[in-house]
Image (cartoon, rainbow, N blue to C red):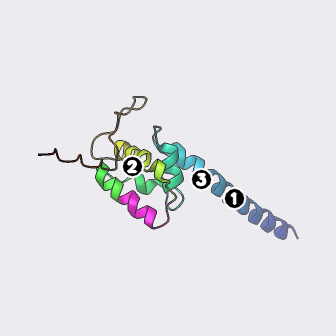
Amino acid sequence: MRSDLIKALTISAAGAAIVAGVILAPAVAQDALPPGPGMEETMKGCGGCHGVGQIMTEKRSAEEWANTVTMMITNGAPVEEANFDKVVNYLATYFGTTPPPAPGAAPAAAAPATPAPAAPAPAQ
């Protein structure tokens, strides 16, 4: 009888730990990313399918991140068009090919990730 109670409590505790892990995982993952403009949009768009650990191991240029985010969107990543540049700039700033800004320092202003349309040729 006592062993049944211990087994039931153990199963209940394990279930509670799993539920707590599922609930707390996004908050822990968000805390693991460096704070900066675009962090929330990046977590929302990228954190649902894979952990931030995968993002944090990458080092890509802004163009490479733009291609990656575009590919992820075609696979269903929920990155809104209005947030595309925010996500790409965040990734390029903190997981790019140049060192990220020091903690507490403001990141450098990033250029838009999407190429600007070419200016029309002057009339001749």
Whole-percent x and y of residue 34? 45, 40
Query: Which is nearer the eye, 23 or 121?
Result: 121
The magenta stretch is: 68-77
Are the residues flagged by discs 1 and 3 in contact, CB closer than 8 Å? Answer: no
Amino acid type at image mark 2: Val
Task: Give the SS element for disc 3.
Answer: helix
Is tag 1's residue or tag 3's residue first in the polypeptide sequence? 1
Whole-percent x and y of residue 117? 29, 49
Residue extending furthest toward the top: 105
Task: Give residue 8's quadrant in the image.
Answer: bottom right
Mark 3: few, some, or many residues within 10 Å (few <14, many ≥20)?
few
Query: Which is nearer the eye, 31 or 113?
Result: 113
Amino acid type at image mark 3: Ala
Query: Which is nearer the eye, 118 or 44?
Result: 118
Mainly helix, strand or loop, the magenta region? Answer: helix
At horizontal 43% and vertical 29% (from top left) the residue drawn is: 104
Q: Which mark is residue 88?
A: 2
Q: Which residue is mark 3?
A: 25
Q: Which residue is mark 1?
A: 19
